[in-house]
Image: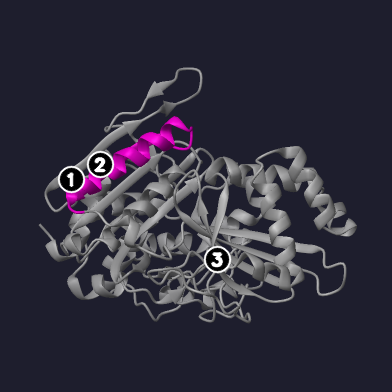
Amino acid sequence: MMRLGLVLVAVVLGCAPGGLPRFDDAALERTPAGRAFRSWLAAYNTGRADSLEAALTRLYSESALVRRPAAERAAGLLDWFRNYGAMTPVRLDSLTQIAAVVTVREELTGGWGVVYLDVDSVPPYPVTGVGLLPFTEPPDFRELTVADDSALAAQVRTLADRLARAGAFSGVVLLTHGSRTLVREAYGGSGGETPTLNTPETRFELASVSKMFTAVAALQQVEAGRLALDSTIGSVLPELPAPASGATLHQLLTMSSGIPDFFRSPRYWAERSRIRTFPDYWPYFAGRPLEFPSGTGWSYSNSNFLLLGAAVERVAGRPFAEVVTERVFRVADMTNTAYDGGGPAGGGVSTVADLERFARELLAGRLIGPGLLARALTGHVATEYGGRDGYGFETRNWNGVRIVGHGGAFTGISHQVDMYPDLGYVLVVLGNSDRSGAQAIASRVRGMIAASPRLAAAGIR
């Protein structure tokens, strides 16, 4: 559960030395939500299925446990524990009778997250929901400060080593600063009948990382005058049913169209082997009601980028994969990247080196021009991951440092590509595990760069 726009009454907190708000443990006793949070956290931090199941049986109503039994809920929380470890409360963000919002420190990753817990408004105030937003912006950057690039690289290696030993990361890390390579390390390997060790040259399935390629391909067509950001997708694909046809390209690129995600259609998963062309996808989402009126909200939907790919293919008069291969991969010298089984909504394969080259060519204005690039890397719409969506790029601003890129996640996959346009850093983390390691590494790098004035002052090298 991740939420925006929480309207909660803040608890007045004391401040620890140096200005970091001090966690007020006693304040939790003031409301039912606070007391429930304390009980929930104590059980969670045991990391034991029996303790969690017993606590959840007490905390949830009978009707809630009929819908989802305590054992099933406990299994989900144990997955959190494997990914993030025990949690220590560091800041009580807000508290009401029915909701507690607490910033926590994750023991395994060293990162920060926010736990949301809601209870019913009627006694005995059973818990109605618990959610975690992991890897949020640190509440205090000072402990993350590093002196220079050598110290930054050493910290990245130390964290990646620790996560790999804990089974939380398997993959490759590449961190560069301008023309300098700071970290280029491989960890773990792939399983299966013929296990192989990862190397810096390993090709990984990309999942949603390749949405950046789709965005660039669409924006190239905008530059060419064949597409327009304020035009509806229905004007390009007249056969597309309403209501999806009414969304604009701007709304598709920023995930603000409200179009449902075809990934959430059980029919799609049952029938996907029959799909041959883009219109074959339309029945799984195009005619369904919008999640919200286009342009009024944000919701991650693979359908948006499927439609962008169809639009590129239509106006270019060539298969989508051919367009991207010629206009993106070849221009950026991405010789180990291909759409093997992928498409505009995600997939394909690549290496850390190819993705770093993509980032460099993009930021240099050689894939799309500077004017449109600036718009693409601007955060237009608030999101649930704590940043804002640009045109196919996640954007964040941590402590005044701008970060853009995209993640990718699927079964057995967890990736993050982060670019620092004003400072010249590029981080590529590709993981062949769906554990939290890739995001933990990316989050720590964000924090260290944002915390370190000397790195920011050095700028692009």
| Image vertical order of residue 147 relative to residue 166, above or below | below
- In this orientation, which residue lies closer to the viewer: 25 or 398? 25
- In this orientation, which residue lies closer to the viewer: 372 or 116? 116
Q: In this figure, which residue is indicated by the disc labeled 3?
A: 23
Q: In this figure, which residue is indicated by the disc labeled 1?
A: 150
Hey, what amino acid is under mark 2? Ala
Q: CA distance from mark 2 to mark 3?
A: 31 Å
* Badge number at residue 219: none
Query: In the picture, residue 75 is in which quadrant?
Result: top right
Whether tag 1 and tag 2 are in contact, CB under 8 A, the answer is yes
- In this orientation, which residue lies closer to the viewer: 289 or 150? 150
Hey, what amino acid is under mark 1? Ser
- In this orientation, which residue lies closer to the viewer: 77 or 370? 77
Q: Secondary structure at mark 1?
A: helix
> Horizontal and vertical percent for residue 332?
19, 50
State which region is magenta. 147-176
Quarter that holds the C terminus: bottom left
Residue name at image x 32 percent, y 53 percent: 445
Residue name at image x 50 percent, y 56 percent: 278
| Image vertical order of residue 186 relative to residue 257, above or below | above
* Badge number at residue 154: 2
Going from the N terminus, do you reach mark 2 or mark 3 first? 3
Quarter that holds the N terminus: bottom right
Q: Residues within 10 Å of mark 1 (few under 14, many from 20)?
A: few
Q: How many marks?
A: 3
Q: Residues within 10 Å of mark 3 (few under 14, many from 20)?
A: many
Q: Residues within 10 Å of mark 2 (few under 14, many from 20)?
A: some
